[in-house]
Image (tube, rainbow, N blue to C red):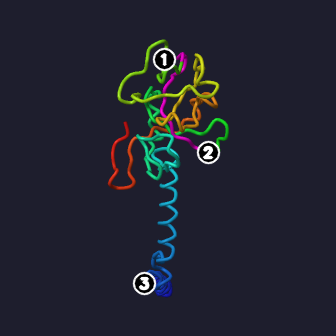
Amino acid sequence: MKKETKKSDANKNQQAKKLSPEGKTRKKGPLREIIETLVWSIVIALLIITFVIQSFYIPSSSMEPTLIPGERVLVAKFYYRFTDPQRGDIIVFRYPIDDRKNLIKRIIGLPGDRIKIENGMVTVNDNPLQGEKFGRTYYDMGFYGQGEHTVPDGSYFVLGDNSQNSDDSRFWGYVPRKNILGRAFVIYWPLPQISVIR
């Protein structure tokens, strides 16, 4: 009888624990849920900025008329993981002279290309650049903007669309492939200017 009494007492204690507040699963408090949500949001945002897409502010007139000061563009940082940069692409890259600064320009010369700016035109491997992306006057300013120069392996020659007011490869040389952050593909601000970048 004593053994049965002890067993029944033990069963009652276990049931009491299950029913008691201590035995219940603790719910997360509202503050903890907010903190966890914020942490996960920051982690996801950092992953997107690092590997997928990033916003870039247009600070100067060097890419006019394609990009206007004050506009904001989206840059596909993953794009060149699957393909090589192409002539005519507008890219954001770390400035070779000061990698704390990011610049935005258009690719003109690919690795191995011979570039020459003369009479307002750019020639690549003795062929004048033609097409809507290059239909503008280019000025032969700077050391690399005079005479013919060959783009080194693994590097790119970039110019601003507003050649008269652009600090680009003519003055400081080439952009190493590793400095390229991504391809600008859409203007998203201001809203009336939303458009695909060409």
- Which stretch did the figure color magenta? 102-115
Which mark is nearer the camera, 3 or 2?
A: 2
The structure residue drawn at horizontal position 48% and vertical position 17%, both measured from the top left corner, is 124
Alpha carbon separation for disc pair 1 and 3: 81 Å
Residue 8 is situated, as x and y percent measured from the top left of the image, at 45, 84
193 relative to 107 in the view: left or right: left
Mark 1 residue type: Val
N-terminal of the pair, mark 1 or mark 2, is: 2
Residue 151: quadrant of the picture: top right
Residue 175 is situated, as x and y percent measured from the top left of the image, at 59, 30
N-terminal of the pair, mark 1 or mark 3, is: 3
Mark 2 residue type: Lys
Alpha carbon separation for disc pair 1 and 2: 28 Å
Q: Residue furthest top?
A: 126
Q: Residue furthest front?
A: 119
Task: State the mark number for residue 124.
Answer: 1
Q: Answer yes or no: do the residues labelled 1 and 3 have beta carbons within 8 Å?
A: no
Viewer-nearest residue: 40 or 4: 40
N-terminal of the pair, mark 3 or mark 2, is: 3
Mark 1: secondary structure: strand
Q: Answer yes or no: do the residues labelled 1 and 2 have beta carbons within 8 Å?
A: no
Mark 2: secondary structure: loop
Position above or below: 7 against 149:
below
The structure residue drawn at horizontal position 44% and vertical position 32%, both measured from the top left corner, is 89
Alpha carbon separation for disc pair 3 and 2: 62 Å
Residue that badge 3 annotates: 19
Task: State the mark number for residue 101.
Answer: 2
Residue 105: in magenta span: yes
Viewer-nearest residue: 34 or 178: 178
